[in-house]
């Protein structure tokens, strides 16, 4: 049964990705901004909600990256159903790497204005996006320490 749920989650992410990536940049992991804004965000939010609860860290990491991009492209949208699950992943996932990435996404969801300059969509992987988000958080922390 768990195998079926994992397979379903991967299938959902793949389906959403194929549908959304029909207008992607040539080497980009994520959709171009127009296709993100035109996508059915409510449906995507529900699917990512399920994917974030997966036992497969790859599924969770991909969902985290996509949630972050959706928020960066739609800063005024309230992703209220996903935010608590992201917080749960940040606090309880068995992988320190996934917990850290969830912490970054949690900050994007709650404080999108801090990341307003980070609206690229040409990231080649989720790791590249997470690296940019981590650099931004480090810069914000360093600037607050200097004050």
Image (spheres, rainbow, N blue to C red):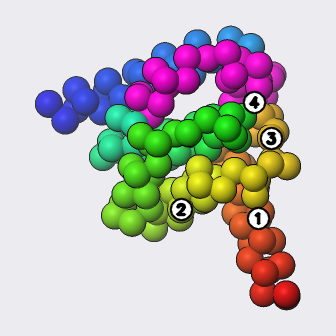
Q: Nearer the viewer, residue 79 or 33?
A: 79
Q: Nearer the viewer, mark 3 or mark 1?
A: 3
Tag 2: Cα neighbours inside 10 Å, few (<14), some, or many (≥20)? many
Answer left or right for 110 relative to 27: left
- Callout 3 touching callout 2 (CB < 8 Å): no
Q: Which mark is residue 103?
A: 2
For image coordinates 76% across by 39% down, the residue present is 123
Q: Residues within 10 Å of mark 4 (few under 14, many from 20)?
A: some
Q: Please identify, in this view, whether the residue under mark 4 or under mark 1 is nearer the observer.
A: 1
Marks 4 and 3, Cα distance to the nearest angstrom?
13 Å
Which residue is situated farthest in the left direction here? 1
Q: Are the residues at dot 2 and dot 1 in contact (C-beta closer than 8 Å)?
A: no
- Label 1 crowd bin: few (<14), some (14–19), many (20+), radius 10 Å: few
Regarding mark 1 in the picture, which secondary structure is present there? helix
Q: Where is mark 3, residue-wise? A: 119
Secondary structure category for the residue under label 4: loop
Residue located at (61% from left, 44% from top): 68
Label drawn at residue 13: none
Distance in Å between CA atoms under marks 3 and 1: 14 Å
Q: Is 130 part of what is drawn in magenta?
A: no
Q: What is the number of the mark on residue 135?
A: 1
In primary-sequence order, the first of circles 2 and 4 is: 4
């Amino acid at each position: 049964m768990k195998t079926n749920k994992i397979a379903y989650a991967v299938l959902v992410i793949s389906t959403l990705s194929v549908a959304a990536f029909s207008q992607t940049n040539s080497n980009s992991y994520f959709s171009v901004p127009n296709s993100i804004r035109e996508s059915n965000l409510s449906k995507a939010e529900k699917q990512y909600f399920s994917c974030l609860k997966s036992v497969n860290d790859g599924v969770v990491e991909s969902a985290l990256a996509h949630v972050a991009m959706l928020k960066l492209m739609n800063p005024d949208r309230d992703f209220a159903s996903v935010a608590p699950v992201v917080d749960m992943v940040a606090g309880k996932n068995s992988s320190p790497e996934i917990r850290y990435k969830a912490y970054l996404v949690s900050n994007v969801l709650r404080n999108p204005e801090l990341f307003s300059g980070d609206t690229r969509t040409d990231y080649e992987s989720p790791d590249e996006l997470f690296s940019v988000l981590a650099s931004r958080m480090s810069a914000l922390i360093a600037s607050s320490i200097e004050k």
